[in-house]
Image: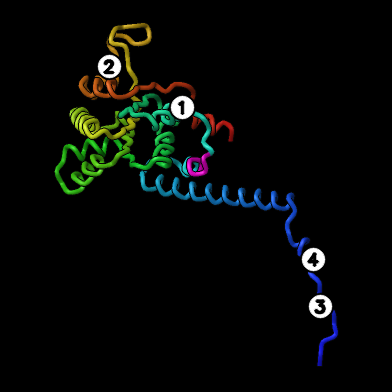
Amino acid sequence: MPDDREPTRVDYLRLIPSPAELDAIDERQRREATLERQAEERYHRNRRLIESNACVTEEDHRRIVRATLSPTQPLSQVRPWSTTGQAFLVLLGPTGRGKTVSAGWWHANHGGIAVTARELCIAHAQEHAEARKLRALVASERLVTIDELGHERDADEAESGIFETVNMRLKRGFKTLLLGNIARVPKKATADAPATAPRTDFATRYGERTWKRIRAQGHIYVVTGPCLREAIEERR
């Protein structure tokens, strides 16, 4: 039988979003895209930081990944240097000033690996498979941090190993960040540094030829100020 009911009328104009609704949709999509991009960036920072083997605390690891690090002297040096053509940056100063954390930031954002001066110099003094593997890794990585300068087991190993690494990486045009507790001490006697005090500065420990290569193609910065670790503990 024929259907005598009137067809349902659809007001298609009401289905079209208003300008305000369209703006809200665009804003929501922008926020979602931003959150997705930030999540992807955090993922890659976390992966690169883990692969770098940089020795940072769990708390600093989270801050690096989340991009919530507080400003420090080392970071103020590493950030601009990371985008320059300079081959070397040396950060010298007492422990607890954020040098290693700044290296973690560098690797999380740009890649590369971190090694200690002790393990690197031992590898240069030996010829077993693991030593050769580490030397090859440091030789091939575009970005490398050498941490804990001054903690090598032997002074001769230290001078030879660091020179060979600096010289090789300079020739290849790779960037190297060097961190240590060594600071320059005046050669002449002063009230603060008597003549009998040992001269434990970078040039003395690693040789003038290493020092000159770094000075010619890089920057040396002595970190000062209070210990950040102690400041954090006091706030707790």
Mark 2 or 1, which is nearer the eye? 1
Q: Which residue was labeled with disc 4?
A: 11
Asked whether, in this view, residue 127 is left or right of residue 15, the answer is left
CA gap between label 2 and label 1 equals 28 Å
CA gap between label 3 and label 2 equals 98 Å
Mark 2 or 4, which is nearer the eye? 4
Asked whether, in this view, residue 46 is left or right of residue 129, the answer is right
Q: Which residue was labeled with disc 2?
A: 199
Q: Secondary structure at mark 3?
A: loop
* Residue depicted at x 51% and y 36%: 69
* Mark linked to residue 40: none
- Stretch of the chain drawn in magenta: 62-67
Q: Secondary structure at mark 2?
A: loop
Look at the picture and state if 148 lies above or below 226: below
Q: Residue furthest bottom?
A: 1
Question: Is residue 153 shown to the viewer in this render?
Answer: no
Counting residues from the N terminus, which is met first, the one under dot 3 or under dot 2? 3
* Residue depicted at x 34% and y 11%: 193
CA gap between label 2 and label 4 equals 88 Å
Q: What amino acid is labelled 3 in the image?
A: Pro
The mark tally for this picture is 4
* Residue depicted at x 49% and y 24%: 226
Find out whether residue 205 is within the magenta segment. Answer: no
